[in-house]
Image: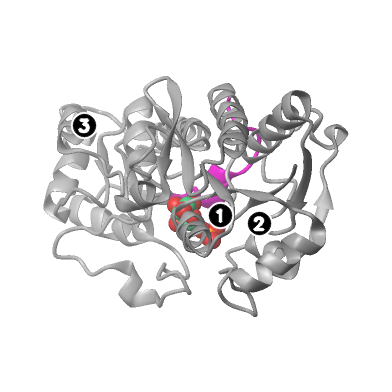
Amino acid sequence: MKIGILTSGGDCPGLNAVIRGSVLKGIAIHGQEFVGFRDGWRGVVEGDVIDIPRTMVRGIAKQGGTILGTSRTNPFENGGGPEVIKAHMERLGIDAIIAIGGEGTLAAAKRLTDAGLKIVGVPKTVDNDLDATDYTFGFDTAVQIATEAIDRLRTTGESHHRCMIAEVMGRHVGWIALHAGMAAGAHAILIPEQKASIEQITEWVQEAHDRGRAPLVVVAEGFVPEHMESPHSERGLDTFGRPRLGGIADQLAPEIEARTGIETRATILGHIQRGGVPTAYDRVLATRLGMAAIDSVVEGRWGTMVALKGTDISHVGFEEALGKLKTVPQHRYDEASVLFG
Ligand code: F6P
């Protein structure tokens, strides 16, 4: 059996560990062959593949990014679609696809499976916002990187008696902000799921300052303060509806400074959170998911995604996987907010 692997959407530390897990188990246990589609669905639509021999995955679990490349190509556009893809697969002798990606990738995979293609999915997002799996690989690494960065912001903030704002990833959910903020001991954590007014935010900042601390605010990129305009409306949107330049931290800094008189600086961590070596936790999770995807292929579980449930890997249908965004629950935010101010 020949299996084609693709990595699609935004990259994420751990992608290479998934590829390695699948290839090593597939070759060792089932004698399978592997090819990689270059740059996500683009490679699938264009039939652009490279062979993945065992030697190619040697030592890559610790390597950031993806050896296959990625893109945000939609397989139904640019001359794609199920018939074109089936023809490429037949020509190349590919029997099944392992698609590693987030919401968009899995939605495309579902449509293609419905059209008769043999696909299994592996969930991927640093944002940790897929409800059907307890954790996604890449999240732990992003939290680790963000925590280290925030720790550094704290010491420079303390030296200058400044308020420091760290903006982390999280378009729709605040998992990275919540975990990195808790780990670094933030005085305020601002996430898209929770409303907070600028008055409340400045109160937290002032309280910390009055105790002689350098106030530390961690904000998820998707947060919009109550009664303040979204930065999206001011700076224009990119194709994904995200602000082109700057972010919410840039908008909050002058507001906080004007209202409290405390000198304030904003830092947007951006793609640093997605780069570099994955943590050991992410390597293990990604490897296990990659190996479980091989089991799904062997068992013919087309249209399903491997998922972490507790400490075990199980399987969920694409339908369930796409159903719901995993947001930060109220009790988790309440728990963290006891430490604000
Ligand atoms: O979906 C993951 C994510 O990292 C978001 O948190 C972030 O908004 C986005 O991807 C960035 O995407 P891109 O790499 O296309 O700029």
- Cβ of mark 1 under 8 Å from ligand 1: the answer is yes
**In 3D space, how far apart are the residues under numbered discs 2 and 3 (Cα atoms)?**
33 Å
Position of 160 with respect to 270 (left or right) is left
Residue at 42% x, 68% y: name it.
243
Q: Looking at this view, is 226 or 308 the one in front?
A: 308
Q: Name the residue under label 2.
A: 70
Q: Name the residue under label 1.
A: 10
Q: How crowded is mark 3: few (under 14 residues within 10 Å), some or many (20 or more)?
A: few
Q: In this view, does 320 lie to the left or right of 246?
A: left
Q: Does the residue labelled 3 lie within 8 Å of ligand 1?
A: no
Element class at badge 1: loop
Q: In this view, does 61 lie above or below 174?
A: above
Residue at the image point whose x is 36% and y is 55% from the top:
249
Give the image location of residue 123, x and y in percent: 49, 43
Determine whether label 2 and label 1 are within 8 Å by CB. yes
Where residue 209 appears, as percent x and y from the top left, is 23, 35
Residue at 31 percent of width and 52 percent of height: 323
Q: In which quarter of the image is the N terminus?
A: top right
Q: Within the image, what quadrant is residue 8 found in? A: bottom right
User: Of 57 and 145, which appears nearest the observer?
Assistant: 57
Within 10 angstroms of label 2, few (less than 14), some, or many (20 or more) residues?
many
